[in-house]
Image: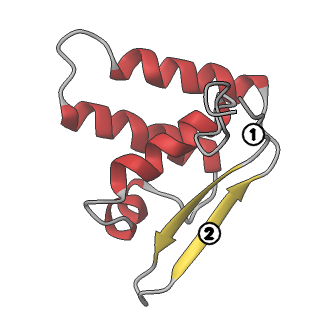
């Protein structure tokens, strides 16, 4: 597993252009928040809507900028992008790089 030290989220703005938001210095506190997010997401009786709300809340807190809000995420990601994009930031914070080769592939 390759180490990931940053994460990013691309959101489409009202003008139709994508803006890339980056967090370059991930901390142990970010890891704790990512683990808490995952714990809540996989709790018993958790609905997909509630899972999405958890992912949105995590990303808003992680990027901590006035441009990354619940509304900007909902408007800036397509139906096909929403779960993969928001989950990718959680995986980045946890140090998981899905593009890295696994030992079985080597």
Residue at 30% across, 12% down: 43
Q: Could you tell me residue 53's position as x and y percent?
A: 32, 39
**Where is 78 relative to 91, above or below?**
below
Compute the Cα span from label 2 to label 1. 17 Å
**Where is 103 relative to 81, above or below?**
above
Task: Provide the residue designation for mark 2.
Answer: 20
Q: Could you tell me residue 91's position as x and y percent?
A: 57, 34
- The secondary structure type at the circle numbered 1 is loop
Tell me the quarter of the picture where residue 12 sits: bottom left
Seen as rendered, the residue at the extreme bottom is 15
Q: Which mark is residue 49?
A: none
Tell me the quarter of the picture where residue 8 sits: bottom right
Label 1 CA crowd tier, 10 Å (few <14, some 14–19, many 20+): some
Q: Quadrant of the C terminus?
A: top right
Chosen colour scheme: secondary structure
Q: In the rendered structure, which disc, 2 or 1, sits on the residue that comes first in sequence?
A: 1
Q: Could you tell me residue 71's position as x and y percent?
A: 36, 61
Seen as rendered, the residue at the extreme top is 44
**Where is 96 relative to 66, above or below?**
above
Residue at 41% across, 87% down: 16
Q: Is residue 69 left or right of residue 62?
A: left
Question: Which one is in front, 73 or 92?
Answer: 92
Task: Provide the residue designation for mark 1.
Answer: 4
Label 2 CA crowd tier, 10 Å (few <14, some 14–19, many 20+): few
Tell me the quarter of the picture where residue 44 sits: top left
Residue at 52% across, 44% down: 88
Residue at 45% across, 47% down: 86
- The secondary structure type at the circle numbered 2 is strand
Q: Nearer the viewer, mark 2 or mark 1?
A: 1
Q: Is residue 63 left or right of residue 44?
A: right
Q: Quadrant of the N terminus?
A: top right
Question: Which one is in front, 97 or 100?
Answer: 100
């Amino acid at each position: 597993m390759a180490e990931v030290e940053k994460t990013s989220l691309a959101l489409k703005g009202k003008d139709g252009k994508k803006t890339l938001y980056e967090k370059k210095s991930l901390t142990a506190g970010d890891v704790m928040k990512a683990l808490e997010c995952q714990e809540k997401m996989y709790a018993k009786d958790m609905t997909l809507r509630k899972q999405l709300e958890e992912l949105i809340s995590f990303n808003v807190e992680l990027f901590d900028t006035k441009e990354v809000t619940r509304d900007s995420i909902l408007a800036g990601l397509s139906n096909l992008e929403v779960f993969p994009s928001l989950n990718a930031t959680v995986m980045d914070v946890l140090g998981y790089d899905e593009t890295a080769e696994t030992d079985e592939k080597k």
